[in-house]
Amino acid sequence: MSHNKFESPLRIDLKVSNKLYIYKITVFLFALLSIVITTSLPLFVRLLLVLILILTLLVYGRKNLSSKINKISLSVMGEWTLHMDDQSSYEVELYGENIVVHFLLWLNFSSASGQKFHLLLFSDSMEKEDLRVLRTRLRFN
């Protein structure tokens, strides 16, 4: 087995990103603020928009309580595995556009059955060394 961490199997435990929560809260607050301060809409329309925004937040929050990806694995042969909170796992392949920059990764996966997974990882979603190795392997593979 190789001692080079860029050629060995990779198994990364994912953490909850505080940056992602701050981003979501900021977007919600700005949307709410823009509805409240506008004067060109009648009051009942603004109240309806606030209600829709809150309902969307509740539905989106409930959706996020479903099983989440908590580990990703990359074998020496380049095979990806996603491990979920409910102990299930999926053999997947990268597909489509994937974004790899210093502060975030946007990865699109597809399983053999056609199920699609999208993973947004900020710099605080994993250990710094794991993020560095993963970014490097994604760029050069």
Image (cartoon, helix red, strand yellow):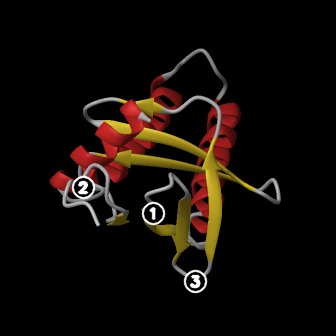
Q: Residue furthest right?
A: 113
Of the two numbered discs 3 and 2 in the rendering, the one whose residue sits closer to the viewer: 2
For label 3, count other residues whose C-alpha is less than 10 Å away and answer few (under 14), some (14-19) or many (20+): few
For label 1, count other residues whose C-alpha is less than 10 Å away and answer few (under 14), some (14-19) or many (20+): some
Q: Is 103 displayed left or right of 64 in the figure?
A: left
Q: Residue furthest bottom?
A: 87
* Label 2 residue SS: helix
Quadrant of the image occupied by residue 3: bottom left
Q: Is 25 displayed left or right of 130 in the figure?
A: right
The label shown at residue 72 is 1
Q: Nearer the viewer, residue 64 or 120?
A: 120
Pointer 2 with pointer 1, Cβ within 8 A: no
Pointer 3 with pointer 1, Cβ within 8 A: no
The answer to which of marks 3 and 2 sits earlier in the sequence is 3
Q: Which residue is mark 2?
A: 130
Q: Residue at x 22, y 44 (%)?
A: 132
Quadrant of the image occupied by residue 1: bottom left
Q: Is residue 2 visible?
A: yes
Q: Residue at x 51, y 21 (%)?
A: 38
State how far apart marks 2 and 1 are (Cα): 11 Å
* Label 3 residue SS: loop
Q: Which residue is mark 3?
A: 86
Counting from the top left corner in percent of width and height, residue 99 is at 45, 30
Kindly identify the amino acid type of the residue bearing the numbered disc 1.
Ile
Q: Is 116 displayed left or right of 102 in the figure?
A: right
Kindly identify the amino acid type of the residue bearing the numbered disc 3.
Asp
